[in-house]
Image (cartoon, helix red, strand yellow):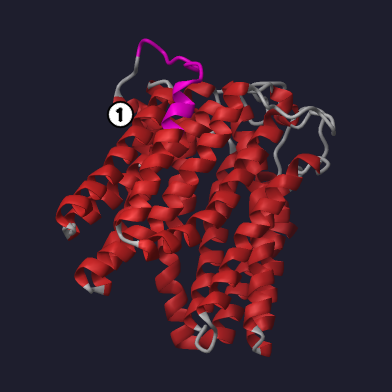
Amino acid sequence: MRPEGSGWGGGVEGTYAARRGSPPPWTPDFVRVWAGSAISTVGTRTLGVVYPLLALSVTGSPAAAGWTGFALTLPILILYVPGGILVDRIPPRSIVLFAESVRGLTVVSVCVALLFSGHVWLPHVILAALVEGAMWVLYMLAEMSLVPSLVERTGLRYALARTESASHLASLAGKPLGGYLFGLGYLMPFAVNAVLFAVSFLLFLGMREGPSRLPVRPPWRRDLLAGFRALRHQPFLRASVALIAITNLMVNTMIMIFVAGSSGLTSLTVGLVLASAGVGGAVGAALTPYLRRPMRSILLVHMWVWVAALCTAALGAMLEIRAVFFAVALFITGFGGAVSNVCIRAIEVECIPPKTLARVVGVSRLTSHGAICLAAPLGGFLVTWFGVAGGSFVLLLAMLGVAVPATRLRVLRAYLVPVSPGSTA
């Protein structure tokens, strides 16, 4: 294992060596991946709305909608680590083609049921949602492994920023599109997604095979531990996993507090407030390539961005101007989160050998995204115990309890700033 910061392209700073104004990495294969990523994200965000709505419509039970939503997110908890092993063993393009074809067949199966019987059984809906969530995890891991092989090292930050920006914009479009299409008829969103997945499949089918995998494959059990072992030797990446888990929990709990206290607001207002995070993410990802050395102390900056956002939300809750202040808070977290995501992903690519990258990403995403599952109950408890204003202040104090010691204590700062030869903190 290489030491922290030694990198695979000249050190951590190597990823950010591109001069301002460097040409964008619009190679034909990268364009296909970028377009396919945007299309797939629109599809998954659309289905994230449609599957629970369909379950609610066919049963009339909110519990059925809840179980369907759970089926969509369950693969995050169980598939990221084994999915990373799979992506490290099989060429990522093949994984993407498999995932897109399975997702397409799944929505076609729902279309067929609706078209010929006019009805779909709840187990069918839940199973389709589970398959969609599983294939999305595999797709994301494969895309993360594929992108670095398509661009020069000096253009990597631009490439990652563009895929991050496409993801945020597609998420913004996908959720309202899902609701709109479902309003046109149960069949419509599934027919549209069948077309989207077919287009994405054809885009990836037209690109080159990409990096090959080792012909000799170690046992699965040893592979399973490889991602954890690789992170153990990367203090900065370990710290980033822990911090992103905390801040993901914070922002999703803040969203739950806002939703729980949104009585009196129109559904349009609530939707616009929640969409502000996606707007911030798209702006942040678009501007990241033009920031000067954004990776220096990125985790320390990330923490204080969240402090500023939670302070804004708490102030809005106290003044009872919730919509505007929560929208600003979510814009801030979206912007800061996009910048951090691009920088951390670039450092992952630099510091982790390509043959174990997907496993490390799987471990880190499992930890950071798994924390989101706790956000809904935590937000509900905070509103019940302290109210909207009190719950917002509790979150702010908790974030300060993380940010202040990490900023002031040298032993913690050492984990939060990546080290590279010849660089200064």
Q: Quadrant of the N terminus?
A: top right
Question: Where does residue 111 sit, x and y in percent of width and height?
Answer: 26, 49
In the drawing, does residue 248 fall left or right of residue 116? Answer: right
Q: Main secondary structure of the magenta part?
A: loop
Q: Amino acid at mark 1?
A: Arg
Segment colored magenta: 200-216
Which of these two is toward me, 105 or 276? Answer: 105
Q: Hey, which quadrant is residue 397 in on the image?
A: bottom right
In the depicted structure, whether residue 399 falls above or below residue 266: above
Tell me if residue 141 is in the magenta stretch: no
Which residue position is annotated with label 1? 221
Q: Secondary structure at mark 1?
A: helix
Question: Where does residue 324 sit, x and y in percent of width and height?
Answer: 68, 78
Q: Quadrant of the C terminus?
A: top right
Question: Where does residue 423 sit, x and y in percent of width and height?
Answer: 81, 33
Question: Where does residue 356 sit, x and y in percent of width and height?
Answer: 47, 26
